[in-house]
Amino acid sequence: MHSLSPERSRATSHSARIVVADDHRVLRLGLVTLINGQPDMRVVGEAATGEELIALYRARHPDLVLMDLRMPGPGGVRVIETITREDPTARIVVVTIQKGGDAMYQALRAGARGYVLKDVSSRDVLAAMRTVLAGGQAIPPAIAEALARRLAQDDLSPREVQVVRMIAGGLSNKEIGARLRIAEDTAKWNVTGLMAKLGVRDRTRAVTVALRRGIIDIEDVFALDEIAAPPTTPRSEPAAR
């Protein structure tokens, strides 16, 4: 994790404080140089991983985060969820190469207020940042249209997202039930329901579609320890009819 010196921070205290997060050093440096060349902005820290960004936000409380979605560690969506859960006023602009409707849908639903593509001009990136800093949202028309189409689709419930993460981690219906403290039959019903929403017939395809749509990240496969450990005896629940 990289941060700027206190001396520079004090010297430009009137400017909006920005944190830049991207695992590609050259791209990150380009964004930092662009921002620091503006009279109303200054970079107060840089991050190359999801963990670094979360820690940096907690330490610096910047006015805005400019971040990529694909970084080592927790995926961008999970990082946004963590930051906005701890600070609902957080202003986050995603700058990414991902044009897919599902990726942007997940990022915006998680709390991002702006979404720009890396192939746009520097002027467009700065305009999006200033819009969000002013309290607005920066979503280009083409992305807004794709988002509207995505919103028309069925969405997974929080419980179903948990279940598909556990499926990605290789857990059986019985193990899923134990983790969620529900009966095995109820867990099986949850698995069947989420597969129907995703339009698939098997668990492998469910994980593939969930990854492609951005519902889960590949890191979710290794994050099952964040879910509460199972009790000694799962609470019995009648299977849904």
Image (cartoon, rainbow, N blue to C red):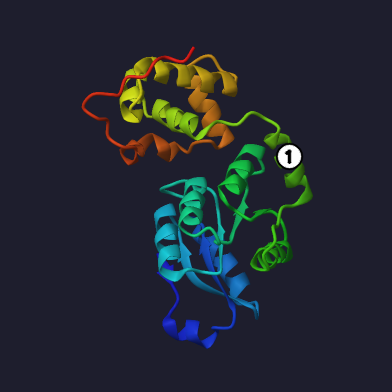
Towards the viewer: 109 or 70: 109
Q: Quadrant of the N terminus?
A: bottom left
* Residue 174 in view of the camera: yes
Q: Is residue 52 above or below residue 144?
A: below
Q: Residue at x 46, y 17 (%)?
A: 189
| Residue of label 1 | 148
Residue farthest toward the left in the current orientation of the protein: 232
Q: What type is the residue that disc 1 sits on?
A: Ala
Q: Residue at x 59, y 53 (%)?
A: 112
Q: Residue at x 44, y 86 (%)?
A: 7
Q: Quadrant of residue 227?
A: top left
The percent position of residue 140, horizontal first and vertical second, equals 75, 52
Crowding at label 1, few (<14), some or many (≥20) Cα neighbours within 10 Å?
few
Q: Is residue 213 above or below residue 144?
A: above
SS of the residue under disc 1: helix
The percent position of residue 174, horizontal first and vertical second, equals 32, 19
